[in-house]
Amino acid sequence: MKTNPGNYFEDFRLGQEIVHAVPRSISAGDVALYIGLTGSRFALPSSDSFAQSIGLPRAPVDDLLVFHMVFGRTVADISLNAIANLGYAGCKFGVPVYPGDTVSARSTVIGLKENSNGETGVVYVHSIGRNQRHEVVLDYVRWVMVRKRDKSAPAPEAKVPNLPSEVAAADFMLPAGLDVTRYDAALAGQPHLWDDYAPGEKIDHVDGMTLEESDHMTATRLYQNNAKVHFNQHSEAKGRFGRRLIYGGHIISLARALSFNGLAGAFKILAINGGRHVNPSFAGDTIYAWSEIIERIELPGRRDVGALRLRTVAAKDHPCADFPGSLTAAGSQPPAELVLDLDYTVLLKRRA
Amino acid sequence: MKTNPGNYFEDFRLGQEIVHAVPRSISAGDVALYIGLTGSRFALPSSDSFAQSIGLPRAPVDDLLVFHMVFGRTVADISLNAIANLGYAGCKFGVPVYPGDTVSARSTVIGLKENSNGETGVVYVHSIGRNQRHEVVLDYVRWVMVRKRDKSAPAPEAKVPNLPSEVAAADFMLPAGLDVTRYDAALAGQPHLWDDYAPGEKIDHVDGMTLEESDHMTATRLYQNNAKVHFNQHSEAKGRFGRRLIYGGHIISLARALSFNGLAGAFKILAINGGRHVNPSFAGDTIYAWSEIIERIELPGRRDVGALRLRTVAAKDHPCADFPGSLTAAGSQPPAELVLDLDYTVLLKRRA
Amino acid sequence: MKTNPGNYFEDFRLGQEIVHAVPRSISAGDVALYIGLTGSRFALPSSDSFAQSIGLPRAPVDDLLVFHMVFGRTVADISLNAIANLGYAGCKFGVPVYPGDTVSARSTVIGLKENSNGETGVVYVHSIGRNQRHEVVLDYVRWVMVRKRDKSAPAPEAKVPNLPSEVAAADFMLPAGLDVTRYDAALAGQPHLWDDYAPGEKIDHVDGMTLEESDHMTATRLYQNNAKVHFNQHSEAKGRFGRRLIYGGHIISLARALSFNGLAGAFKILAINGGRHVNPSFAGDTIYAWSEIIERIELPGRRDVGALRLRTVAAKDHPCADFPGSLTAAGSQPPAELVLDLDYTVLLKRRA
């Protein structure tokens, strides 16, 4: 068999190391297409001059574009037979990626647990993305529910890894040379700095973006993420939803892009503490988003910049002026209009 | 309030200076996506070797891509609450933009006039786009009809600026080093040069391009133009048209791209004298275009190149063999099939 | 008449040389958009580091992107009035194209044969694409059925060129410096090398890709291929199919991209021996593909790499587990679900 059937639950072994195929050079072309597909307007990845004004050599690649490129490498090995992408934890962004860099990915299986139905199991992988100089650009854990090929295959010893609920401030990696002395809030798009956001504050990002088949497929193909459910209407018409399912990462990107309206000063993502794709999204849905400030974090040894831990929630066909999902108790069923519940940490300038 | 509600009519003051957010680095990726979304085929922005053959260091960024990028900067401050983009005047293209350059924009409010209904007013802004060396890349006036937040807010003293009906030849900026001695008409796509076009001559550009939601949204997102009406089907379904409205600039780009068939030698736009988006365009419409030669302009001190002032009209679902709108009297209601009426000036080689 | 009506059958003369318009600089932006539109994952055009590991200076432009760019140059002169793109022969890929290179194209008319109905004729052209250093990047023959402008125009003397059924191994051009000593099969995406494929072996590429109007139009515009049938729903609604026809080259690209699943090690295309667009494709169709190994070819003077001659067949809305079309006798009517039957030759590493 020359084609890749993808790994089934019983193909994974605890401690297994996987070298993912096709290192990916990321170019200014990928950067442009990412802006075209998401509408992201954050100043740092949009502007060489803004990047230089805060001490970087030029505009780095958008953090989420790096995430999708690394994630895309892992799909053929990890999630081709996945039923659901269950969660992320401990996702740390490393050294900046610049156009011209090449990212590659490796994963280690750190947890396995067969489900009681005997038909599926949960696989936990720790994935690391590196650039061509072997520097870490991304480091995260995700877990997916994967089909068994053979229901009678024996269950492995269950191992559920101990996962962090958040990335610690000591693990944030700030770009080398970062100096916000000349940071220009007008050019960044918002006067508000780190100090202006208070824990508990909620921000409706107001705008909405309607999903098109062409847009999500082009984004997902760009990342070379080949999960079948995103591309094949002929087979999905007979599937669970009758439609192509949109890559959850595209929704993360849209939520982040929408969050510019209210959080324009959050010029960089430091970490993704966790996240869930609460419900699926489809072409024709309009995505809205709102954020809550969870925590204001001081950074070790820095008085000039600080971190905000955010919860950003995305909803479909539901404007977020009423902050949908904000009162949902942990563990209860989320409202049908919610599609994303993301816990992440961003970097902002502090007042002098 | 952390989100940008946009400026309402009473937020603008005469003489107000606005620094627009997010300088935008323009890359080879933006250039490629612009060609992919418009189908433009003009030789100068398509080809380094053609650009070098006429004395430029390499292919400059398409003039209209520069226009959209500068315009996109201004939207969040000027036209987020606009009901209509009423017109353009005095639009001059400055030094060429090359991939790697970063454009930023500033605007000055040069006119204000409240409408008699007391609900809206017209705002005139003079916008200037500059590159990272502070050289002017674009300089234009546009005026928009903007909602008042509060109908009872007092009207400002009316000031309607004196606007030029055309950009004077003395204000055209030719690229430094331009030398058409080795201009190759076969490679440019058309044997006809400046001398071959006569005032009054009409050209049907023949071809048609059907609009798709994904295409116009991707173009508009690429320019980081965040006007809500282009992206949100959920809210527009309840709006004026029941549909997403296509950014008028995308229609300008399509009309220019279609004009290659008949005006391939018009390798550069020097100025936009004026223009109106006569009717809205929507996904599913097919855009056609025709042009009339308004004037043949000799350029001061140049015998090698000349300018043509053109009127290019775009129509939807209406082939232009009958030159729709050509007989429309000024001030009368334009035909429903017309979407664009553009008055601009282009550069061509002259016969030796 | 300033617009290009395209050439009709009687406009072509045997031996005629045509310089095609608009040399095209190919950038990293075109490369990114090509991946975004096709989902191609082959390691060589995706990765500078992979390219360097096998002796190239950096990732070359995907062979098929080069093909489409050269082909796109020729459309305005050769096939604007074509009814059908009948076939390709003797297509050889030359020196690698790198981002920053500019390709241009010339064609020679090498055959003409009027059809017996007196309304159309077949035109055979030999087209050559060159880079800015005048090195050949592509060399091929195609023949198209073209309308006559005037049915009463006299038929030229019929001349049908002698066309090769395959490109000879001696004519394959390997990239200078190619050295697969450090080729990493895990990074390429598949453990199988040249030696592992046997003539007669059939591979179902499993995956399917649904076509969208926006995707095929953006791809075709990117190549500046201006054939009207791909873009104008307003006119095509009254045409042969009632719909926009998808550029056959887009189907070739999708079939190649799908073939990664089973042929990931085929890192470069050496030649296209022949190919037919068996039936048209439209938006909404889902493309599947399968391949048969026709021949394993040793390359003169090389023990490290070898060529595989492949037949790749693409079908619409028909998974390829049953290898549709594999039993079709030459000359018989192909099944309605087939859209492409391509005969081409690829390069792989051999076992040491």
Image (cartoon, coloured by chain):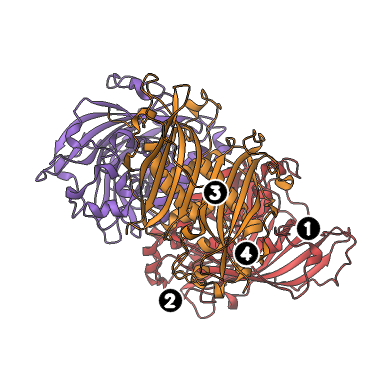
Chain colours: A purple, B orange, C red
Give the class, few, some or many, for how many residues have Cα within 10 Å of label 3's Cα (few <14, many ≥20): many
Q: Which residue is mark 1?
A: C331
Q: To which chain does the residue with label 4 belong?
A: B
The residue under the point 21% across, 54% down is A55
Q: Which residue is mark 3?
A: B253
Decide which of B287, A152 is in the foreground and name it.
B287
Tag 1 or tag 2, which sits nearer the N-term?
Answer: 2
Query: Comparing marks 2 and 4, which lies closer to the viewer?
Result: 4
Proximity of marks 1 and 3: CB atoms separated by less than 8 Å: no
Proximity of marks 2 and 4: CB atoms separated by less than 8 Å: no
Please check whether the numbered discs 1 and 4 fall on a single chain.
Answer: no
Q: To which chain does the residue with label 1 belong?
A: C
Coordinates of residue A311 in the picture (x, y in percent): 27, 30
Location of the C terminus of chain A by quadrant is: top left
Q: Amino acid at mark 4?
A: Trp
Q: Which residue is mark 4?
A: B194
Proximity of marks 3 and 4: CB atoms separated by less than 8 Å: no
For label 1, the SS is loop
Q: Which residue is mark 2?
A: C177
